[in-house]
Image (cartoon, helix red, strand yellow):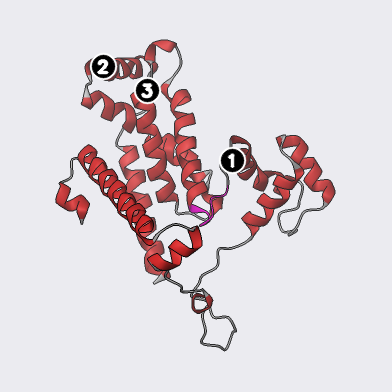
Amino acid sequence: MVTKVNENRGDALALLLTDARRFPILSPERELDLARAWRDDGDQAALQDLVGSHLRLVIKIARGFAGYGLPVSDLIAEGNVGLMQAAQKFDPDRGFRFATYAMWWIRAAIQEHILHSTSIVKMGTTAAQKKLFFNLRQLKGRLEQFEAGDLSPEVVATIATELEVPEKDVVEMNRRMSAADGSLNETVLEDGEIEWLDRLVDEPLTLDDLSRRFHVSRERIRQLEVRAVDKLRKGMLGAAKTLGLSAELAAA
C-alpha cells in the first residue's frame, strides 16, 4: 500500500514537471505584454501563459520545503494557489519582474499549508512563531543540534537571540516539532486491547444537566440551542449562495 501511494505521488509530480516544461521562459518584454494584457483586458490566454511560465518557480520553491514530511506534489499545488494570487495582484508597471513578486506569494501559501498540516495542533499563529518554525530546523543543523532532543540553554539562547524570540518559545517549538502526533486508536499497553479512545469520557449532557451547570432554566438552554442551530444554518446557506450551490445541498 505504501509503495502504491508513493508511486501515485511520483506520477503526480512527473505530470506537474511535464506541464511546467510546456511553457517557455519569458523574456522581460513578453512578460510585460502578458501582464498588461491580463491586468487591463482580463485576457485569460495571457494569464495562462504568464502563470504557466512560472510553474518551474513553484516547483523549485516547493522542493525547498520537502524536509517537512509532506508530499512535494501537495506543496506544489499550494504554491500554485499562491502563484495565482500573485497574478491577480501584480502591477507590471512597478518596474520589477513577476517572479520577484510571485516568490513571496508562493512561499507564503506553502508555509501556511505546512503550518496547518504538520500537526493536528497548529504550530504557529504569530509572525514571530512562523519565523521560528521555518528557521529552527536550519539553525539546529548549523549548530549541529539536529538530533539532540531538548536543546541546551546555550543553544536556546543563541537561537532566541538570532530570531528575536523569547527563549521559552524556542524550547516549546522544538518540543512540538520533535513530537509526533499520537493516534487515539493506539493501544494503552503493547499487548492490550484497550485503545486510548476507550479511555475518553463519554458524557452527553441533557438540558437538565446544562441548566443546573449554568444556573438557568431548562427552557433557556433550549432557546440557546435553537438559536445556535439557526445561526449555523444561515451561515451554511450564505456560504452555499456565495459558492453557487443549491440550498438543498447546503442543508444536507
Please name the residue shown 45% across and 38% down the image. Answer: 109
Q: Which residue is mark 1?
A: 130
Query: Which of the marked residues, 3 or 2, is nearer the chain's N terminus?
Result: 2
Badges 3 and 2: C-beta atoms under 8 Å apart?
no
Left or right: where does residue 158 sit relative to residue 40? right
Query: Dot 3 lies on which element?
Result: helix
Q: Callout 3 environment at 10 Å: few (<14), some (14 to 19), or many (20+)? A: few
The residue labelled by disc 3 is: 89
46 w.r.t. 141: above or below: above
Q: Identify the amino acid type marked 1.
A: Lys
Question: Image quadrant for the C terminus?
Answer: bottom left
Sort mark 2 into few (<14), some (14-19) or many (20+) by Cα contacts within 10 Å: some
Magenta-span inclusion, residue 229:
no
Rendered location of residue 194, percent (x, y): 52, 84
Q: Are marks 1 and 2 in contact (CB under 8 Å)?
A: no
Residue at x 41%, y 50% (from the top left corner): 74
At label 1, counting other C-alpha atoms closer than 10 Å, the crowd grade (few under 14, some 14-19, many 20 or more) is some
Q: Quadrant of the N terminus?
A: bottom left
Instruction: Tell me the CA gap for discs 1 and 2.
Output: 36 Å
The residue tagged 2 is: 37
Secondary structure predominantly adopted by residues drawn in magenta: loop
Q: Position of residue 127 (x, y in %)?
A: 59, 35
Mark 3 vs mark 2, CA separation in Å: 14 Å
Q: For this rendering, which residue is in front, 115 or 78?
A: 115
Q: Secondary structure at mark 1?
A: helix
Name the residue located 55 percent from the left edge and 67 percent from the top edge: 182
Query: In this rendering, would 136 be left or right of 39?
Result: right
Lower sequence index among marks 1 and 2:
2
For the record, the magenta segment spans 117-123
Q: Picture coordinates of residue 30 (x, y %)?
A: 32, 17
As for residue 120 lying within the magenta part, the answer is yes
